[in-house]
Image (tube, rainbow, N blue to C red):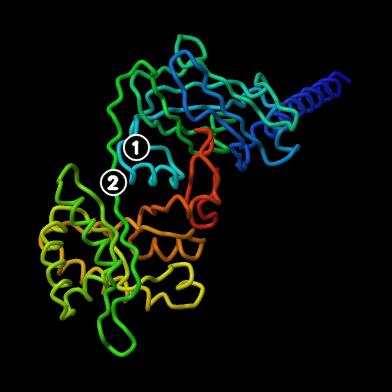
Amino acid sequence: MNRSGRGWRRLAVLCFVGLLLAPTVAHGAAPQPFDMTLVGQNFNVAPGRQFRFVFALPDGAVRESVLSDRTAVVRVAIFPPLATRSDVRSFATSTTDPAVRPIDQIDRRISDLERTAAGDFVSLFASTGRLNALNLEQDGIYPVVLSVVQKNVVVARLNTFVNYVDPRSKIDQLPISLMADINTPLALQPDGSIQIGDGIRTQLTNLISVLSVGAAPMSLHIAPELLDGLGRSSNPADIALLAQLEPLLAVHELLTNTFVSFDPSSASRSLMKSEFAEQLESGRAVLDVHNREGVISENVWFSRSLVDDDGMKLLGESGIQSVVFTPQAAASIGTLDSYLKPYKSVVGNSLAIR
């Protein structure tokens, strides 16, 4: 009887231990990764102001899972400021943290965060102070990694940036580049002759007068076909204009251009990318002949009309990094009435206000 009693007690103890261990194994399961989305933030932050990040989780099930986990935190890590455009691009597309250590890092329990009406999470941090603060010391564009951590495992992350600027800082004046656009019809006629009208000669004479003053360097957008026509013309007036113009081109910046006007959007839609590339190469060759030792800016494109997605992609493939529009071309975009709506020209959403 005693042996039987001891057996029952041993069985009861084993069952009790089993009941204790089973939930522990389930609770110790590794958290599953998921996507998080940045809904909004304040990009510009000054000393004494708050960093504000609003992020969304995929669905209600993930939200409830994270909220019920007392180990779940949102982590904000700020890294040293970036200095070059390539650094910004590299961080924006990276899926890992920068190689350097973060300047500052802070965790907040997700269950303590504020929520929006849509159920998104609002994470607020001070820019100065000791508690719940991300302390920065100098102006600059800082890379930020926003992540969700459960049981010391990063289950979601995204990259963003903040512009930390002290209004009291002394900021150098932004240099302004003046640009002259010479818009002329073709000089080469269907019969092979060169025809340059008096109106074109007047434009060139005025340009020579402005450039001769030498007040400041200018960027020049001029058709290579026109320069080629001046060089081929037998008219003494055209020869004299080119002789006056060439020394001035050498001390100013010429913007890259196709030999004849060629809209990149139309070229891409018409499956004429190779023709566009040939025209661009021919145009650069003519500019190089007539500007002597001057500089050709091969990564800036000047346009008198808007460029669509296809055109932007073609320009990018051609080495263009910046696009400058005339005021008339940009009129349909609207006015820049808020720093929160910068002009952004990208493939997939050409020249939109974001």
The front one of 267 and 201 is 201
Which residue carries the number 2 mark? 178
Please state the horizontal and vertical placement of residue 179, each as a whole percent of the image.
Answer: 29, 50
Q: Nearer the viewer, mark 1 or mark 2?
A: 2
Q: Position of residue 64 (x, y in %)?
A: 74, 31
The answer to whether 266 is drawn above or below residue 204 in the figure is: below
Sequence-wise first label, 1 or 2? 1
Residue drawn at point x = 48 percent, y = 71 percent: 266
Closer to the camera in the image, 236 or 225:
236
Q: Nearer the viewer, residue 79 or 166?
A: 166
Rendered position, 277 above or below 9: below
| SS type, badge 2 | strand
Q: Label 1: how many residues lie within 10 Å, few (<14), some (14-19) or many (20+)?
A: few
Label ID, residue 214: none
Q: Amino acid at mark 1?
A: Ala
Q: Residue furthest front?
A: 198
Residue 332 left/right relative to 13: left
Residue lying farthest to the right in this orientation: 1
Return the x and y of residue 47 as percentages of the image width and height. 43, 15
Where residue 186 sits in the image (x, y, percent)? 33, 75
Residue where numbered disc 1 is placed: 99
- Label 1 secondary element: loop
- Residue lying at 34% horizontally and 44% vertically, measured from the top left: 85
Q: Within 10 angstroms of label 2, few (less than 14), some, or many (20 or more) residues?
A: few
Number of numbered discs on residues: 2
